[in-house]
Amino acid sequence: MMDQAKWRKSVNITTTSCLEPAFLKMLKTCGFDGIDLNFSSAFFDEEQKWQLEAICANLQEAGLKCAQVHLPTYGLFADSGEDDPEMERRIETALRIMPALGAKWGAFHMRSAVKHDFDRKKAFKDNAEKLKHLCAIAEQYDVGIAVENLPTFPDRPDAPFFSSRIEDQYTVIDAVDHPLLGACWDFGHANLNIQHKDRTQRELITQLGSRIKIVHVHNNYSTRDSHLPPSIGSIDWNDAIAGLKETGFSGYFSLECGSGPGNFDLSKAYCAFCAETTDILLRITGGD
């Protein structure tokens, strides 16, 4: 059984949610130890200094850590060879402020060669070049970039997105060969990927091994990217968590199944359910 500290829980929320002190305190009360910060568009549309200061103060007051971030993302059908200056600015801004948040790693979506019939060699070349550039920026702030496994949707076999195959992740990571480049393992996306139906998550996770720096935890029934709580869906958690343990992973078990402020009482009940069932899941799978 692993050291409990290695299995602290975090949950994905937006920068907007982090401006709500009561919401953050509620997450702590529910049993979460940290957050996975997702940058909302509003964060980049307004002056960032006051927002960053407020977020850091609110997290400290609530007793939560910023475990990791999700770097800004292009759309799934954005071509790997065509950059958008505003999106690039947002990604670089997120890397720059990660140290102030206390986050070491940020999840990153690689793009596909959509305009070249999803050619994987083209996508590999484009993403490797992009990540070399971003790693040079990340190096200035001593923060890391974790390339995420994206899903291939059962109803869109014509869109085999780059990084939906595990080979895409590790070949890019190994080619760039930078200590601040690793992998983000998304359990829900892995459950969708039709290319890997003959392989277990344990096999895939152990193949990535120590390249895995952060995880995204959610579930589905292999038909859509539902982002359900881990206790609802078809993932074999005994298998998946066994694989994660074998890698020596010591980060946060970070949920990505929704939690934003709405009706406070409903949000509290939902977050408490997610935290408690995750505790039970980790206990029965030997992950605590």
Image (tube, rainbow, N blue to C red):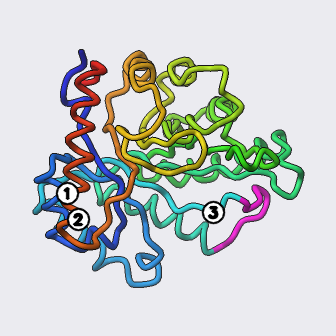
Residue 148 locus on image (x, y percent):
55, 43
Q: Work out whether 286 lies above or below 62.
A: above
Magenta part of the chain: 77-85
Q: What residue type is labelled 1?
A: Ala
Closer to the chain start, of discs 3 and 2, is 3
The residue pinned by badge 2 equals 266
Residue shown at the point (37%, 45%) measured from the top left: 229
As drawn, the label of residue 74 is: 3
Q: Which amino acid does label 3 sit on?
A: Tyr
Residue shown at the point (50%, 34%) measured from the top left: 179
Tag 2: Cα neighbours inside 10 Å, few (<14), some, or many (≥20)?
A: few
Drawn side of residue 76 relative to residue 94, left or right: right
Drawn side of residue 88 relative to residue 275, left or right: right
Residue 71 locus on image (x, y percent):
49, 57
| Residue 128 seen in the current view | no
Q: Work out whether 190 lies above or below 118.
A: above
| Residue 130 seen in the current view | yes
The residue pinned by badge 1 equals 269
The CA distance from mark 2 to mark 1 is 5 Å
Determine if the magenta segment contains residue 2. no
Quadrant showing the N terminus: top left
The CA distance from mark 1 to mark 3 is 32 Å
Q: Residue furthest right?
A: 116
Tag 1: Cα neighbours inside 10 Å, few (<14), some, or many (≥20)?
A: few
Cβ atoms under marks 2 and 1 closer than 8 Å: yes
Residue 281 locus on image (x, y percent):
28, 30
Cβ atoms under marks 3 and 2 closer than 8 Å: no
| Secondary structure character of the magenta stretch overall | loop
The CA distance from mark 3 to mark 2 is 31 Å
Which is closer to the viewer, label 3 or label 2? 2
Which is closer to the viewer, label 1 or label 3? 1
